Amino acid sequence: MSLRVARLLVLVVSVLLLVGLALVLRDPRIPLGVPGEWTWARLGDAVEPVAVNVGLGSVGLVLYAGFVAIGRRDLGRSTRPRRREAAWLAALLGMGVFAQLAALMAAPPGYGLAKMVTLGLSGSSGYYTVARSEMGDVAAFLGDYPEWIREQDVYHIGTHPPGLFLTTRGALAVMNAFPALARTLDEALPAELANAFREILGPIPRADRAALVLIGALTLLACAGTAVPLYLLMRGSGCDAAVSWSAASLWPLVPAAILFQPTADTAFPLLATAALALATRRGPIAAGAAGVILAVGMVFTLAFLAVGLMVGLMLATSPGVSIRHRAGLILATGAGFLTPTLLGWLATGANPFVIWWWNQANHAGFYVEHPRRYAAWLLINPIELAVALGVPAAVWAVVGLASGRAPRVSWIALGVLVLLTLTGRSLSEVARLWIPFCPMLLAASAAGLARLGGGAVSLGVTTLLMAVQVVVMQLMIQVVYPGI
């Protein structure tokens, strides 16, 4: 079989799987998960898309696919791509934001940018509620956090370190300190978002609305910006500019990264990918910086325990490096992690290790209160992961892994996800919980494209198919609103 035929076959398989996915999403008799345990909700019959918005959003996504193809072609031809790489990366950052905004525009009213209102709902996370009502004295709140977190629930609040509360409180403080900025942001809100605030949250201070919008905007920027460290991760893994571009340019259209906006899970890939990109540099300074990033991540979520494991495995398996040097890099990462962690403990009086202990205890308590059928989720998790990553990207990832061309980081990420599933640490909701690991799987997608000789056309078509999946999913299901 020629490479051209093989590429065509992969794309045809992707199309067929997307058709199958659309049929499943359309049929209410098919549960999107495990009934009685966890299922994703479909949009109600009363929710109707606006044809103009779908059209404009789709045009924007087509333009992004064209941009991706042109970038792939240019980087593939360049013999000295360093300057061009920087220019294309800068353009990818801007176009990534554009692509995600275009995708959100195509969603039905209330399910695009208006989802920022969920940041103020206690049922979605509760960070705003706590920041607004319990953090008048931030120092006292942090000092009492180890005991406070012990008494919290098994959901969002009880399973997270204080980072998201601090972020929300910081945004509120900024907007209260600069009322002119708050007024500017508030008056610039799109009508759909302004209506959502009014109808769902009701009357809240202008500074609060502006703070929630600021958090949502920064989350989207961090999400789209993940493409930059992903590109650097690919380059550090030995991939050329064109292959690295293939992985990075697919990221903005990963369905989970768009459907779960503006939840913080969509911002965490930036830190996770940056830490792994630094780990590929094989130098003590870069390793120490990776440790610092892991420490920052652990202020927000225990998911960075898994990221830290991946960084350690990346360093431990570095090719062409002596065992002594590998050990030194791991020690440098540990030092980079412990230094800000211990300084934070000293500054706040809050023992981070006690906080993390109760976070994981609360997380374990979730499965006590909401038991999961282990065998059922062993089957559902990989399916949900493939949909979250994007079916076209997942098909290419299978090609990359099966051919043995996938970078080490893809194998390490896959191994960690298998470990999380087999140990029962991630049973259900992996489409959201595993977003930080999706960039590493896109590395395998890019390898699959390269293995079959895929160039600008193949990448452009794949990007279009990813866009189709995003639009279809936004028109059929919802994953953010807590049953309001």
Image (cartoon, helix red, strand yellow):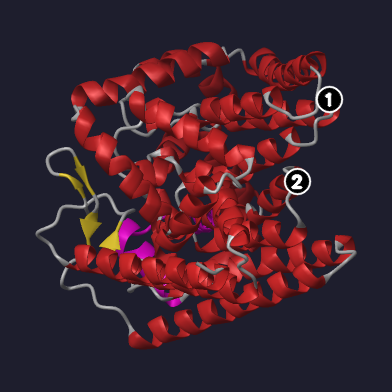
Can see residue 58? yes
Please provide percent x and percent y for residue 194: 42, 69
- Magenta run includes residue 196: yes
Which residue is identified by label 1?
284
- Magenta run includes residue 17: no
Residue 159, compared with residue 96, is above or below; it is: above
Residue 154, compared with residue 50, is above or below; it is: above
Is 298 placed left or right of 11 in the picture? right
Q: Quadrant of residue 395?
A: bottom left
Can see residue 110? no
Please provide percent x and percent y for residue 454: 60, 67
Please provide percent x and percent y for residue 333: 73, 22
Rendered residue at 32%/41% (across/down): 381
Question: What is the span of residues highlighted in magenta in the rendered image?
Answer: 191-213
Is 73 placed left or right of 51 in the picture? right
Which residue is identified by label 2?
238
* Nearest the eye: 297 or 308: 308
Q: Which amino acid does label 2 sit on?
A: Gly
Crowd band around label 2 with a 10 angstrom C-alpha radius: few (<14), some (14–19), many (20+): few
Circle 2 sits in a helix, a strand or a loop, which is it?
A: loop
- In the rendered structure, which disc, 2 or 1, sits on the residue that comes first in sequence? 2
